[in-house]
Amino acid sequence: MIQEVCECLNYPKLRMQAKNVLRHFGNDATDQLQRYYLVSSGNSETSTAILRILSENDNNANSMFLFSSFVQFPAGEGSGA
């Protein structure tokens, strides 16, 4: 069920309700949210919504995931150059 709710984050008219449901699930939604973040990385609005939900659930797994999502490669690394 959590995966289906994550998919609703792609639809602007359903996004707010989906965020509320996912917040209600709390830490139980962490794994699915992290997976869906990677799947939806091309959609900035969905990715931002997921990061916000994860940041509200204060646990170590979320902290590590959030930190890793903000780390950038130094110039020249990771770009295939």
Image (cartoon, grey):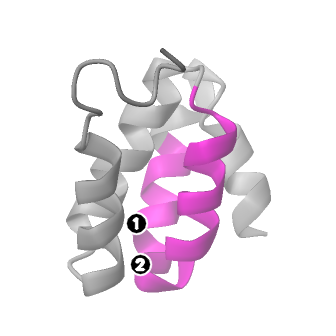
Task: State the residue in front, 8 or 74.
Answer: 74
In the image, residue 14 above or below residue 30: above
Across and down, in percent, residue 17 comes to 52, 45
Residue 38 included in the magenta stretch of the image: yes
In the image, residue 69 above or below residue 21: above
Q: Going by the image, does 73 lie left or right of 27? A: left
At horizontal 37% and vertical 33% (from top left) the residue drawn is 48
Q: Which mark is residue 26?
A: 2
Q: Which mark is residue 23?
A: 1
Residue 21 included in the magenta stretch of the image: yes
In the image, residue 51 above or below residue 74: below
Say which element carries label 1. Answer: helix
User: Mark 1 near mark 2, Cβ–Cβ under 8 Å?
Assistant: yes
Q: Which mark is residue 7?
A: none
Q: Going by the image, does 31 lie left or right of 78? A: right
- Magenta region: which residues? 17-41
At horizontal 25% and vertical 84% (from top left) the residue drawn is 59
Q: Amino acid at mark 2?
A: Gly
In the image, residue 57 above or below residue 75: below
At horizontal 28% and vertical 70% (from top left) the residue drawn is 64
Q: Residues within 10 Å of mark 2 (few under 14, many from 20)?
A: some
The N terminus: image quadrant: bottom right
Q: Amino acid at mark 1?
A: Arg
Across and down, in percent, residue 58 comes to 20, 78
